[in-house]
Image (cartoon, rainbow, N blue to C red):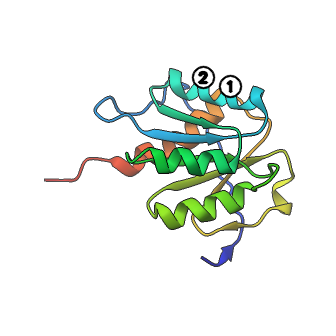
Amino acid sequence: MKPAALNVLLIVQMDTQVSAPSDHRKTVLVVDDDPHVLKFVSTVLTQHHYEVLNAVSGIEALRLAKENPAEIDLLLSDFQMPGMSGVELATALTHERPGIKVLLMSGFPDGMLVLNEGWHFLAKPFIASQLCALVAGLIVTHYLPEAS
């Protein structure tokens, strides 16, 4: 994929009860080397009925993805981590799982980041309602029932 302009999703005031549909729990692979961020994100998403896989590094995330044959709907990764960056991880996972959505998070100013087309960005720090709105917007709305 060719790098494109940074995709920044604007947050609209939304109810924090936005959750995955109950008929199919969406799976989110959360990757962050900061254990506090990892726990916060994992807890929020679990409370909103998402299946969450946690990894503290890109290498661990790739291993989890290989061990989990079920669909992973979203990669939510820190942008900069030791060893393998979030961009390197997202590139590897999108080759293995072309349908996976990508949401990278960072405390860096968004003007410094370049993302591939279709990838999205979440600025740190963020609150639970922002996280839930972005995740729902990226994966829940992509599973609207087909018209009959």
**Residue type indicated by callout 2:** Thr
**Residue 91 in view:** yes
Q: Dot 2: what SS?
A: helix
Residue 13: image tag: none
Give amino acid for label 1.
Lys
Q: Along the line of sight, which residue is nearer the eye, 66 or 9?
A: 66
User: Which residue is identified by label 2?
Assistant: 43
User: In this picture, is 54 found above or below 88?
Assistant: above
The answer to whether residue 1 is above or below residue 12 is below
Q: Is residue 131 left or right of residue 125?
A: left
Return the residue found at the far bottom.
Answer: 2
| Image location of residue 101, percent across then percent down | 52, 55
Residue drawn at 49 percent across, 25 percent down = 48
Residue 138 visible in the displayed image: no
Q: Position of residue 8 (x, y in %)?
A: 69, 55
What SS does tag 1 mark? helix
The answer to whether marks 2 and 1 mark residues whose Cβ atoms lie closer than 8 Å is yes
Quadrant showing the N terminus: bottom right
Mark 2–mark 1 Cα distance, whole angstroms, equals 6 Å
Give the camera-side residue of 131 and 33. 33
Picture quadrant where residue 32 is located: top right
Query: Which residue bears the numbered disc 1?
Result: 39
Picture residue at 68% right of the left edge, 25% below the top? 39
Pick whichever, 20 or 53, lies toward us: 53
Instruction: Locate residue 53, reporting x and y percent.
Output: 54, 36
Marks counted in the figure total 2
Q: Tell me the residue at 79%/34% (across/down).
A: 34
Vertical comparison of 139 with 88: above or below: above
> As drawn, is 70 to the left or to the right of 98?
left
Left/right of residue 147 with respect to residue 64 in the rendered view: left
Vertical arrangement, residue 51 with respect to residue 122, above or below: above
Q: Residue at x 64, y 79 (%)?
A: 2
